[in-house]
Amino acid sequence: MSRLGDLMDTLIIGDRTPDQLYHRIFVVSAFGGITNHLLEHKKTGAPGVYALFANDDRDHTWLDALTRVANAMFEAHAAILQDAADLSRADDFVRERIEGARSVLFDLRRLCSYGHFRLSAHMQVVRELLSGLGEAHSALVASLLLQRAGVNARFVDLSGWRDETECSLDQRIAGGLDDADLTRELPIVTGYAQCREGLVQEYDRGYSEVTFSRIAAYTGATEAIIHKEFHLSSADPKLVGEHAVQKLGHTNYDVADQLSNMGMEAIHPTAAKVLRQANVALRIANAFDAGDPGTLIDDCDADTPAVEIVTGLDVVALELFEQDMVGVKGYDTTALEALRRHNVRIVSKISNANTITHYVEAPLKTVRRVVAELEKTYPSADIGVRSIAIVSTIGRDLSGLRAFSRGLDALERAGIDVIAAHQTPRNVDIQFAVPREDADRAIDALHEALVAGTRQKVLEAAA
């Protein structure tokens, strides 16, 4: 979104005729960094307005943070809008929303100073309120920019600002789009939608893709397109080299699910499920390579077996060993319940007669809390924790490739110790557990052996 001006002459308008400009709906996220300022930094966890407000000890640091949000919004649209009237409209919009949020938070603090009200009971609503500010701002700015360029853009605000109605997500979408004329209007829709379900509560930072998918299903779209800053490729080009990576071009929702599990989301898994059930194909396109069709994701099987992508994820291996486990039920259930209570995401698991190992994505201190709980339940068990990485080779069909043995051989030749390896009968992914410090080298080795090297042999055979 921060490069919206660059996309006007390619992605949005380009050489399209007036008729071709329409029959589309754009669902937008906030400008870069705005949601981090509003909530907390997605990667570092640095507190934004929400986190500061939640932990306010009467120094009101959240007020300064809210001012920083306003300044960041002013800078974002000033870098895109050129017309003075549009700039004034955007400035007024930011002031109205920020001051409104400031008043709401002050009133909530005042209300919760009375003993009958608890701030903790309202914090999820605060998170929802703050989340919608960024998308509403970017959608308005995009609409103004397009209108100035002669496009009949329509600002569709689903954030529920000053709306007293309570409705479901589908009802909110219907209220925003039912009277839109897609033959002559181009709706610019907020990625956040206020609804009874609570999008942020349900999907955290993946809410805009959920809104996007529900709009695609609701309107019966021919295709849903996510525009990213890069192509969906066979590996991270920074790790294996830009010369070695290949654009996927075509894959299916099964592969998209495996990527989500490995923290490399092509799309939020709930959003993928909505599109899949509605029989809407998804396309992942590079917004800055407008002539390229990108990668189509649908339900089609692969024409030929192939490893399509290699990726990795840092995890913690939680190993529960109990000599008396064999033949006794309940160990796995107890471990799963402990992980659920501490909100720990399980990436993979494996077990044998007396050992259950969960590979989880969570801070080490959280996993240690789980360990402490399990040690109380099973005092004679030996419970170990180890920081490692899982490197996964993924494809629609891996049958007949000997990818498991070839992958082990590639890692051995690279001098990488394999802690564990696992392949399911479904033949869509193979997981190699390796020391965390060797993860990047493992991705490079597996990509060379199973993707780049295989492609080279095919080219040589064709020649």
Image (cartoon, helix red, strand yellow):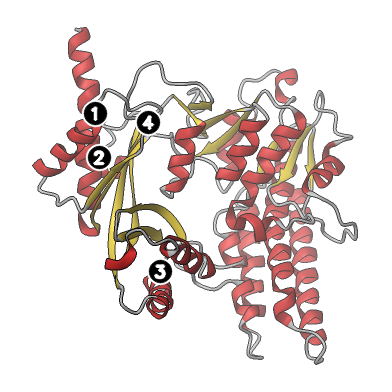
- Dot placed on the residue nearer the N-terminal end, 1 or 3: 3
Q: Amino acid at mark 4?
A: Gly
Q: Secondary structure at mark 2?
A: helix
Q: Amino acid at mark 1?
A: Ala
Quarter location, residue 317: bottom left
Quarter location, residue 402: top left
Q: Secondary structure at mark 4?
A: loop
Q: Amino acid at mark 2?
A: Val
- Dot placed on the residue nearer the N-terminal end, 2 or 4: 2
User: Residue 18: where, in percent of width, then height?
Assistant: 74, 20
User: Residue 73: where, in percent of width, then height?
Assistant: 65, 60
Q: Nearer the viewer, mark 2 or mark 1?
A: 1
Which residue is under mark 3? 363
Q: Is residue 231 left or right of residue 191?
A: left
Which residue is under mark 4? 395
Quarter location, residue 129: bottom right
- Dot placed on the residue nearer the N-terminal end, 2 or 1: 2
Which residue is under mark 1? 452
Residue 240, disc: 2
Picture layout, residue 350 above or below residue 170: below
